[in-house]
Image (cartoon, grey):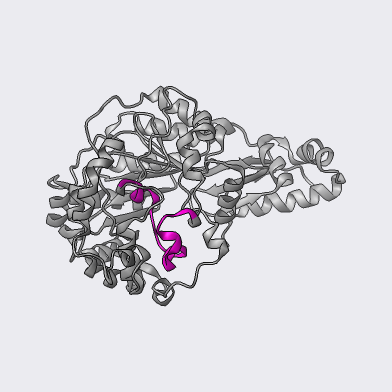
Amino acid sequence: MSLMYEMNEKAFEHGVPLSVHLDVTYRCNERCVHCYLDHDDHGEMTTGEIKGILDQLAEAGTFLLTFSGGEVFLRRDFLELVAYARKLLFNVKVKTNAVMIREHEAQELRRLGVEQIQISVYSHRAEVHDAITKLPGSWARTTRAIRFLKEQGLKVTIANVLMNGNLDDHKGAQALAHDLGVTYTLDPTVSPKMDGDHSILNLRVPGSVLPTVFHDASLVGNVDEYCAAPSTPGEDILNGIPCSAGHTSCYITPYADVFPCVQFPLPSGNLRQQKFMDIWRNSSQLADVRSIRARDLTTCSGCGHVGTCSRCPGLAFMEGDMRGPSTADCEKSFYRTGLPSENMRRQGLTMPAPSPMLQLVQIAPALVQGL
Amino acid sequence: MNNLYIARSSAIASRVLAGETMVMSVTDSTFFTLNEVATAIWQAADGVTPLTDIVTRSVCPEFEITPQEALTDAEEFVRELATHGILQVSEQPIPNQDAAIAGAA
């Protein structure tokens, strides 16, 4: 058991928001085809408001702070915010497309003590990456920035999202990461837009591609372990929580809204109206999220995958029920192990439906009303 | 034995969680947790207070330990943290810590 895992357990025990994801803007200089955000500025927080929230988070015990967006460098005060966060001794991670990072910005990120920088790269081929970001020249600028950051000795991770538009390029992107000397992650998850629009789910790769990804040791480590059939879930699993969202982590939007997670758009309070700890301790929405144990899940509690599935409560929420299944994760569990989920069984399916996205789109209108 | 002065590196992230202090080096991501005694020393590491004073003022009364025993353990502890670059140890005072923590790694 790692030290960080132990501290996360301790944070859970004491109700401490150990990890916070803070989007400082939704504005962006790219227009990625799969992005779930609305890029207009509807009144994002001022420098002073964000600093005030950072003060509150430090007081609340937050240690791991992720600055993300939108594109963080579109805020002229971004480095000032990083400096302020570092003065408060947060462990700072930055998610960026990096197209605005040149030598100066790389030097500043190093000087300020940013621990890790995650950068989206969708292909080793400029034309494929640029077609996804819709920003001509973005691949060249992003990869050049990665070199600047590496020259400064910063820890960089390339994050790739696998979708229809770059289906054949993930090995090439992985090789690019290797050449650049950075870590590589691949995620086949495309999330619905935060306004409830599910149309971008059409970009998800067909499930038939997933077995290849899940059986790639360079991506998942021990394949036999990763793809093993799940054992019967015991009491410890059934009494466990679905994930850390709302327990030891949360998400804050550029408009000061607090959600359980960036992928779990359940409005739980607003920091322009309440103090962070008032929301963290007293929000009925967060209390609802925290009350859920695996045994409470309407379908998944009876599923053999319940202890090993990547089931995202946020995606389940966007399908209509935070206690229900997340179809995309059922699909992943199936293609990882070859065994159908309880959700599939109840629908009489021995393998995932050919177009689960269509099913999602039909559910979407009710969800939009709910939001 | 000369007096030692200790100062927290600027290249760390740190937070107290239920009495323990989490410390991570932002240069190599090494992660430590400090128990309550170590936390008391860590929090007093201002670069200008001698380690002997820190031990006698912050550690001995709080944790009921003899000064000599505490000082031996404290020196071992601070030298261990210094090898990981998260604490500076010097036989001279280490000035200007506020400015350092605000900036350079």
State which region is magenta.
Answer: A296-318
In the image, residue A20 above or below residue A255: below
Q: Nearer the viewer, residue A17 or B96?
A: A17
Q: Nearer the viewer, residue A279 or B77?
A: A279
**Please, what is the dominant secondary structure of the magenta stretch?**
helix
Residue A321 horizontal/vertical position (percent): 36, 47
Q: Quadrant of residue B42?
A: top right
Q: Residue at x 82, y 43 (%)?
A: B63
- Residue B64 left/right relative to A36: right
Q: Residue at x 27, y 48 (%)?
A: A145
Residue A225 within the magenta-colored segment of the rendering: no
In the image, residue A357 above or below residue A16: below
Q: Residue at x 61, y 49 (%)?
A: A10
Residue A90 horizontal/vertical position (percent): 50, 40
Q: Could you tell me which quadrant the N terminus of chain A lies in?
A: bottom right
Q: Nearer the viewer, residue B46 or A281?
A: A281
- Residue A57 left/right relative to A141: right
Residue B98 horizontal/vertical position (percent): 57, 31
Q: Could you tell me which quadrant the C terminus of chain A lies in?
A: top left
Q: Quadrant of residue A186?
A: bottom left
Is residue A93 something that shows in the picture?
A: yes
